[in-house]
Image (spheres, grey):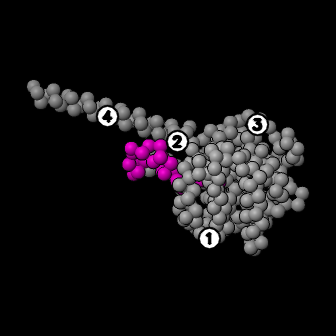
């Protein structure tokens, strides 16, 4: 009788544990889809509202997804900046930063990832990588920008996308602002009680910038705020430590989203100086 009661208790406990495990797995999968990508479709403004002429572009990716992009051409551009934005909003939320880059003599090509703004499709890690590569090819083929005069720029998750693109094309310059080392490291930050092997199995995304930065040979400027409350500063330090030279590290203060505005003029000057310094070495 006692053995039967004990077996029943064990059985019920296993069912409860299985349900909790399933619930947690579903939660993490939900986090993967909803906690990583925050697209919005409404275009709230355009560069025209800040006095910038621009060209609205639609391009087709290698896997057949239609993307929306803007091209803001400088009169005598120092280089062309390919802008990989962060995980929230869309291109219309980056007009202030576009204007900053334009004011230091850069043409700017900014695209919306699939599922963002007026771009079709649904976001995914593989999809974001393809969107960046297709935008890069558009600059080469349609705008006839020499590859050595393309500055690949990314902010937040866009910095991880930019690092992946630089790893692929191995040309031009790279500017990474607020990148994280990998999704696994970010997952460990959010779920410190879970073993790494379990996180690696259930996350479903990698965004592994650390392994790729070790093989990016082009000049790189790594930017990170020591006060970043979303992507810890230690990840920027680790990426810089593992990056191949030539490389520079620009340290800011201020929150993840506000640091660039707190240092607006200095940020613009640092970007311009970096491009001028290394552009002459690009063949």
Q: Quadrant of residue 107?
A: bottom right
On screen, residue 138 above or below 92: below
Question: Quick one: SS at disc 1?
Answer: loop
Residues at badges 3 and 1 in contact (C-beta under 8 Å)?
Answer: no
Q: Mark 2 points at which residue?
A: 32
Foreground label between 3 and 1: 1
Q: Name the residue under label 4.
A: 17
Question: Quick one: SS at disc 3?
Answer: loop
Q: Is residue 142 visible?
A: no
Q: How far apart are marks 1 and 4 (CA)?
A: 50 Å
Q: Could you say where residue 111 lies in the image, as x and y percent from the top left?
A: 73, 48
Residues at badges 2 and 3 in contact (C-beta under 8 Å)?
Answer: no
On screen, residue 49 above or below 159: above
* Mark earlier in primary sequence (1, 4): 4
Quarter of the C terminus within the rendering: bottom right
User: Crowdedness of circle 2 by 10 Å Cα count: few (<14), some, many (20+)?
Assistant: some
Badge number at residue 43: 3
Q: How far apart are marks 2 and 3 (CA)?
A: 25 Å
Q: Mark 1 points at which residue?
A: 245
Which one is in front, 275 or 139?
Answer: 275
């Amino acid at each position: 009788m006692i053995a039967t009661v004990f077996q029943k208790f064990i059985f019920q406990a296993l069912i409860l544990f299985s349900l909790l495990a399933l619930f947690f797995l579903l939660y993490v999968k939900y986090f993967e889809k909803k906690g990583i990508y925050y697209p919005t479709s409404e275009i709230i403004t355009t560069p025209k509202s800040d006095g910038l002429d621009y060209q609205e572009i639609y391009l087709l990716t290698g896997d057949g997804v239609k993307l929306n992009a803007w091209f803001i051409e400088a009169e005598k551009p120092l280089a062309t900046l390919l802008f990989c934005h962060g995980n929230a909003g869309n291109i219309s939320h980056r007009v202030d930063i576009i204007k900053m880059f334009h004011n230091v003599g850069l043409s700017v090509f900014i695209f919306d990832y699939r599922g963002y703004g007026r771009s079709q499709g649904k976001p995914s890690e593989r999809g974001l990588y393809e969107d960046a590569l297709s935008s890069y090819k558009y600059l080469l083929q349609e705008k006839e920008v020499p590859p050595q005069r393309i500055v690949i720029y990314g902010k937040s998750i866009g910095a991880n996308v930019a690092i992946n693109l630089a790893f692929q094309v191995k040309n031009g310059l790279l500017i990474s602002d607020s990148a994280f080392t990998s999704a696994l490291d970010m997952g460990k930050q959010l779920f410190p009680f879970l073993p790494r092997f379990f996180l690696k199995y259930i996350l479903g995304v990698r965004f592994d910038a650390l392994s790729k930065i070790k093989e990016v040979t082009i000049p790189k400027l790594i930017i990170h705020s020591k006060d970043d409350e979303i992507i810890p500063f230690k990840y920027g330090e680790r990426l810089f430590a593992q990056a191949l030279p030539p490389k520079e590290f620009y340290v800011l203060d201020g929150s993840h989203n506000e640091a660039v505005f707190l240092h607006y003029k200095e940020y613009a000057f640092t970007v311009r100086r970096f491009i001028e310094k290394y552009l002459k070495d690009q063949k």
